[in-house]
Image: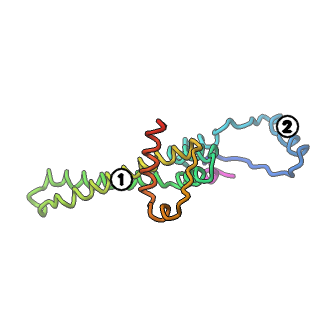
Amino acid sequence: MLAPRSYTREGVVELQCHRSEVCLKRVLRACLDAGARLAEPGEFTLRAFLNGRLDLSEAENVGKLISAKSVAAADAALAGIQGGFSSLVKSLRIQCIELLTEIEARLDFDDEMPPLDLGLIMNKIDSMSQDVEHALETANYDKLLQSGLQVIVRNMCLVRILDHTQICHIFSIALKLLNI
């Protein structure tokens, strides 16, 4: 596969052969004899990160997916690989830049601009703060999942009443109690 279309954004050769142990060993031996080497654990993900295919959060989630101890942990890691946290960070960065642009413009051209709506700015900052708090709660929940801890909620009424934020809050309390 020609660069940059591969997972690592490098030129790679992919071999496919029958499942026969004999065939697999012969093909592998021929490759090693020709100068190839076995990849180290995580090497392809590291190369993908270094070549800009994955950001750090996505690369970390590849490792979490591989070591997931439950379906929920695997699902959380997969969501991370698909850019959930990365898109939040990008969104927060854009919002910060917009606020800073507004503030800098007012420092330079205050007399030429309409009056400052401090309430609107405070609402934006509060919304960003809530997004960060939610991300921290989600990170705590993900940490519980990665540790292999499984929680079963038996009362279906409770499941219907609690939303994702409340469940994350309960898990963050559990994390503190367990010192995880």
Task: Determine which residue is flagged by label 1.
Answer: 92
What is the secondary structure assignment of the residue under circle 1? helix
- Tell me if residue 6 is in the magenta stretch: yes
Instruction: Specify whether 92 is left or right of 50.
Output: left
Residue 107's x, y, as percent?
Answer: 14, 50
Left or right, 28 with reference to 84: right
Q: Eyeballing the image, is 142 above or below 155?
A: above
**Residue at coordinates 31% horizontally, 51% vertically from top-left?**
129
Q: Residue furthest right?
A: 22
* Image side of residue 39 versus residue 122, left or right: right
In percent of width and height, residue 37 lies at 75, 35
Residue 95 vs residue 148, the one in the foreground: 148
Which tag is nearer the camera, tag 1 or tag 2?
Answer: 1
Where's residue 32, x and y in %?
A: 80, 35
Q: Is residue 88 magenta?
A: no
Mark 2 closeness class: few <14, some 14–19, many ≥20 residues within 10 Å: few
Label the magenta part by its dominant secondary structure: loop
In the image, which residues are magenta?
Answer: 1-7
Vertical placement of residue 73 versus 164, above or below: above
Place residue 126 in its image quadrant: bottom left
Upstream in the sequence, badge 1 or badge 2?
2
How many numbered discs? 2
Q: Amino acid at mark 2?
A: Arg
Cα–Cα gap, marks 1 and 2: 50 Å
Q: Tell me: 128 left or right of 16.
A: left
Q: Which mark is residue 29?
A: 2
Element type where label 2 sits in the image: helix
Q: Residue at x 53, y 60 (%)?
A: 155
> In the rendered view, would you say 171 is above or below 178?
below
Closer to the camera in the image, 77 or 43 = 77
